[in-house]
Image (cartoon, rainbow, N blue to C red):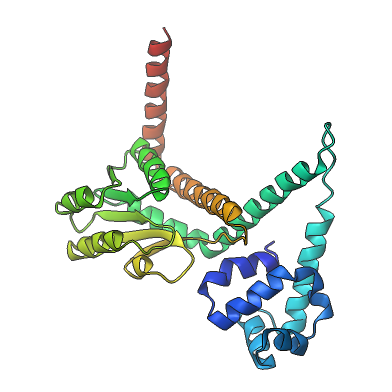
Amino acid sequence: MSTALVILRSERDRMSAIERRIADFILENAHLLRDYSSQQLANALGISQSSVVKFCQKLGFKGYPDLKLAISEAVIRADSNGGTPLLPDGTPAVAAQGYDLWLRKSEAEEATRLINPPGTLTAVAETLGHAGTVFIVGMGEDDLHARALALRLAQLGILTVHNFDAAHMTASLSAAKPNDVLLAFSEHGLQPALCQLAQHMRAQRGKVITVTRHSANALRALADQTLLVAAHDERPQIERLLYHSALQHLLDRLFIRLYETDAARRARLQETLERQKGTEAIKCA
């Protein structure tokens, strides 16, 4: 069951500036929210009480009391799971940090699951499965996930062309056909080079699938289908870990969907794995 705090984090990137201020205040002061009335919350943020009520209703709650109750329940649930035992060397702080990281990763993965329901994954899997060629591109850290997914798709027998260089990918897309797909990875969706590749693919009448954060961005606006990641933390070093963890979990779900829905892909993967085992055995010998 998704908690109110997870819902807030998953929807944050789609919110207006005022809504984001409300969400951030609630996330940062969740333990204190039970002492705030809707008017006090509005006064603390310098907004109208009606803005608070509309915010709650937009998230699917009847009103502020329902949201406040849901937040309190989420806080209690988190606190009840927070009894981290001491380690043998007597370092409870380290243990608490490990538990906090695990908890935040779990929340990010759940939030990402909420904004990529089974129907979305099925539709993306069908598009990839029926593609003549899947062109996969990512730059910088995004290429880590692009490269790994390209390998997995190839193991399923899906023809892939992977590249992290925009110029080389532009040349490859010149041969793209209407049933081909461009799968572009970009955390923030702001690289002009990737937007140009998406426009090029659309001109070739191919499909564009983007993998970005759950935010409005230029690359996402060019997509036929989108996979979205929700991962937020005020600590930048933690937020990066949450993003990569949630994205990997999302791609794992996509891979399983592709594997389970086609017998030929299942057989192809088994053949590939057996061949790899044989190659490793030869090297060891």
Q: Nearer the viewer, residue 262 or 1?
A: 1
Q: x%, y% of residue 46?
A: 67, 88
In this image, 241 relative to 142: left or right? right
In this image, 21 relative to 179: left or right? right
Q: Eyeballing the image, is 262 above or below 90?
A: below
* The quadrant where residue 277 appears: top left
Q: Nearer the viewer, residue 224 or 268?
A: 224
Q: Nearer the viewer, residue 253 or 167?
A: 167
Q: x%, y% of residue 25?
A: 68, 75
Q: Eyeballing the image, is 200 above or below 245?
A: below
* Residue located at (35% from left, 69% from top): 218
Q: x%, y% of residue 139?
A: 35, 50
Which corner quadrant holds the N terminus? bottom right
Q: Nearer the viewer, residue 142 or 115?
A: 142
* Residue located at (20% from left, 62% from top): 200
In this image, 199 relative to 217: left or right? left
Q: Eyeballing the image, is 54 above or below 15?
A: below
